[in-house]
Image (cartoon, rainbow, N blue to C red):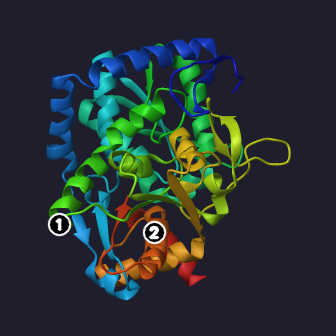
Amino acid sequence: MEKVSVESRGYFGEFGGSFIPDELQKVMNQLEEQFLKYKDDPEFIDEFKYYLKEYVGRENPLTFAANLTKQSGGAKIYLKREDLNHTGAHKINNAIGQILLAKRMGITRIIAETGAGQHGVAAATACAMFGMECIIYMGKLDTERQALNVFRMELLGAKVIPVEKGQGRLKDAVDEALGDLVQNYQNTFYLLGSAVGPHPYPTMVKHFQAIISEESKRQILEKEGKLPAAVIACTGGGSNAIGAFAHYIEEKNVRLIGVEPKEAATLTEGVPAVIHGFKCLTLLDEKGEPQPTYSIAAGLDYPGVGPEHSYLKTSGRAEYVTVTGQEALEAFLVLSKTEGIIPALESSHAVAYAMKLAAELPPEDVLIVNLSGRGDKDVEQVFNMLKN
């Protein structure tokens, strides 16, 4: 998208901002105004908390993974159970928050993008709940990998539009959703699922996902009487990780560790660039264009990452590491067999690294792994991977 205007707000160091056409900037300014108006509004907060409790099923547990801890050796591993949320992932937290904002803005046409399908399902769920039109853009390749989630979205009344342009993956779905917003901004709310995009989206998504670390911080103090040595979460666009990190960022003794697929190592290998209307660490090809990426986890398959993660990396506050698809697959199987919990392939990347890190730390240390989603959506894919 053409770099037309740059907003001074919404920066994390050099990252973030708003590099979008002027017409779309007016929409972002209005969205920011409404977000700032309602985020601290007692009535809005009460309604958000009501749906988190009565509809999403929060607060979810912080589960001590005793068997996984024993198998790994070393530090205690706790799992923050976002997989137990209604719809099976962390995405619903943000979908409810943004849909309540859309409701107050009087907008009833909702568009969204999705990779693994979990955000699409969450958006379709929230739209069904509030009687809103829902259009989901999804890369054609991802619709094939995640056919079950496509059917779920359609069951919930959403219209799923497969995107064949480019690689037919998450980046291409975001391109199409932004294009729709440019055409239909007067009557459309873009319910963005990750902590990416032009300001105010990264800040807004973090705000609604921060409930993860708000709960886990209270829970670990109740269970262990101390903060964790590290909080570990997978990073694609970065919404579950920024939510898992939010309330620990000021706790300098808590390590924040984001785990990327080695095949899409944006934070590890990326360079500063503008993608989808914001500046972040980005994987670029020799022509300076966003590089094709691939991960066994469709939700991590993105050549950019949230601007705050880019800042946390370059400032040294957070660490970002990679695991291979094979290591994630092994962690998927290990957690299933040791704890009776089938994790999403995205979350399995975090589990894989946590098992390695736990083995290096003393038994008195504690780790929190954000189990961002459950693996129902991935079972058929894993079945086919193991069969071949």
Is 225 displayed left or right of 277 in the figure?
left
Q: Residue at x 53, y 62 (%)?
A: 297
Foreground pick, 336 / 44: 44
Foreground pick, 364 / 110: 364
Foreground pick, 98 / 73: 73
Q: What element carries label 2?
A: helix
Q: How far apart are marks 1 and 2 (CA)?
A: 24 Å
Where is residue 105, by image quadrant?
top left
Q: What element carries label 1?
A: helix
Q: How crowded is mark 2: few (under 14 residues within 10 Å), some or many (20 or more)?
A: many
Image x and y of residue 63, in percent: 24, 68
Among the two numbered marks 1 and 2 on one chain, the one whose residue lies closer to the N terminus: 1
Q: Mark number for residue 348? A: 2
Q: Is residue 99 visible in the rendered structure shown here?
A: yes
Image x and y of residue 173, in percent: 59, 40
Q: Quadrant of the C terminus?
A: bottom right
* Residue 32 to residue 338: above or below: above
Q: Which residue is drawn at 50% across and 80% down?
A: 330
Residue type (three-letter) at the residue carrying disc 2: Ser
